[in-house]
Image (tube, rainbow, N blue to C red):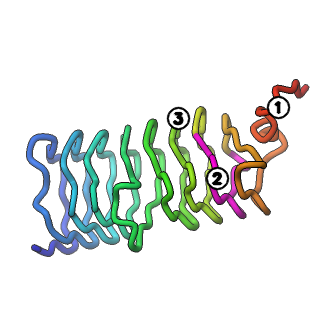
Amino acid sequence: MPYFDDLTYEKLDYSANPPEKGNYESCLFRNCNFTNSNLSDINVTDCRFEDCNLSLAKINNTQMNGITFVNCKMLGLKFEHCNPFLFKVDFENCQLNLSSFYKLKLKKAMFRNCTLHEVDFTEADLPEAVFDNCDLRGAVFDFTNLVKADFRTSFNYSVHPETNKIKKARFSKEGIAGLLDKYDIIIE
């Protein structure tokens, strides 16, 4: 497979023609459109995506190691289809609505200023993950490992203590309702 190192890809439209399959290392993708693109079987290491649209991209067996997404639109991505080996991603100012991280290992993952509506974190391993100022409306946490995760500045989450590991996870007083909404009680 071809090897691409320390390159910048700017304002490219991959929606009709996906990037060449290969190993991309320390590359920058800026203002690129990957909508509905087939990114399967591509290895991406220590790369950065800025202002890109990756909505509904196919990422089967895609290796993502040390990837940072900034200001990206990433609707409906099935991250659980990625190669789980060395999977490491961080997100800042991204829209991840309707995406899924089912059963993925995301230790110390960073979600900063993200919209995570109806994202599936079922059975994901998220110890020490940080959800900084994220909107988690409708996000699913079921049998999820959230040990030492930080939700203090996030909102609209619903995390049930009985079905998730939340030991030493951090929540704000204002967000405590997200731990109790299952009981249909009124908190004033």
Of marks 1 and 3, which one's residue comes earlier in the chain?
3
Q: Identify residue for label 2.
A: 143
Q: Identify residue for label 3.
A: 117
The stretch of residues the image draws in magenta is 140-153
Q: Position of residue 76 (x, y in %)?
A: 37, 39
Of marks 2 and 3, which one's residue comes earlier in the chain?
3
Left-right relation of 48 to 118:
left
Amino acid type, mark 2: Phe
The answer to whether the residues at label 2 and label 3 have Cβ atoms under 8 Å apart is no
Residue 136 position (above or below residue 23):
above
Residues under labels 2 and 1: Cα distance? 18 Å
Determine the image quadrant of residue 145.
Answer: bottom right
Q: Identify residue for label 1.
A: 183
| Residue 58 in sight | yes
The residue sitting at 75% across, 38% down in the picture is 178
Amino acid type, mark 3: His
Q: Nearer the viewer, mark 1 or mark 3?
A: 1
Position of the C terminus, as image quadrant, is top right
